[in-house]
Amino acid sequence: FVVLRTAKAAGSIAARTAAEAPETGAAGEIPGIKPGQLKRLTLTLGKGHYSLICNLTGHYGQGQFVDFYVR
């Protein structure tokens, strides 16, 4: 999973047919989470819009992303 600081909505970062989304504005990530595995990521984020995406091949295109705001 990758946390991106971006003005774009999570669903418009890349085409749904793209193998991966660009990671421009990455604020942090957890690489390689295996099924059933638990990992924790702690970030200090400034105010703004962020997207959380799964950037494993094909996962972004399957809708594994969400927008969130820090206020």
Image (spheres, helix red, strand yellow):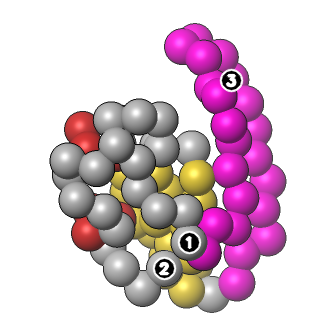
Q: Secondary structure at mark 1?
A: loop
Most common secondary structure along the magenta stretch: loop
Quarter containing the N terminus: top right
Q: Which mark is residue 24?
A: 1
Disc nearer the start of the sequence (3/2)? 2
Across and down, in percent, residue 56 comes to 47, 35
Q: Is label 3 or label 1 in front? A: 1
- In the picture, measured across the screen, residue 56 lies left or right of residue 11, that is right
Comparing 65 with 68, the one in front is 65
The answer to whether the residue labelled 1 contacts the one labelled 2, judged by CB atoms less than 8 Å apart, is: yes
- The residues colored magenta run 25-46
Seen at 77% across and 62% down, the residue is: 43
Q: Which mark is residue 38?
A: 3
Let me know if residue 63 appears in the view: no
Q: Is label 3 or label 2 in front? A: 2
Q: Which mark is residue 35?
A: none
Seen at 34% across and 68% down, the residue is: 13
Circle 1 crowding by C-alpha within 10 Å: few under 14, some 14–19, many from 20: few
**Marks 3/2: CA–CA distance:** 26 Å
Quarter containing the C terminus: bottom right
- Kind of residue indicated by mark 1: Thr
- In the picture, measured across the screen, residue 38 lies left or right of residue 24, that is right
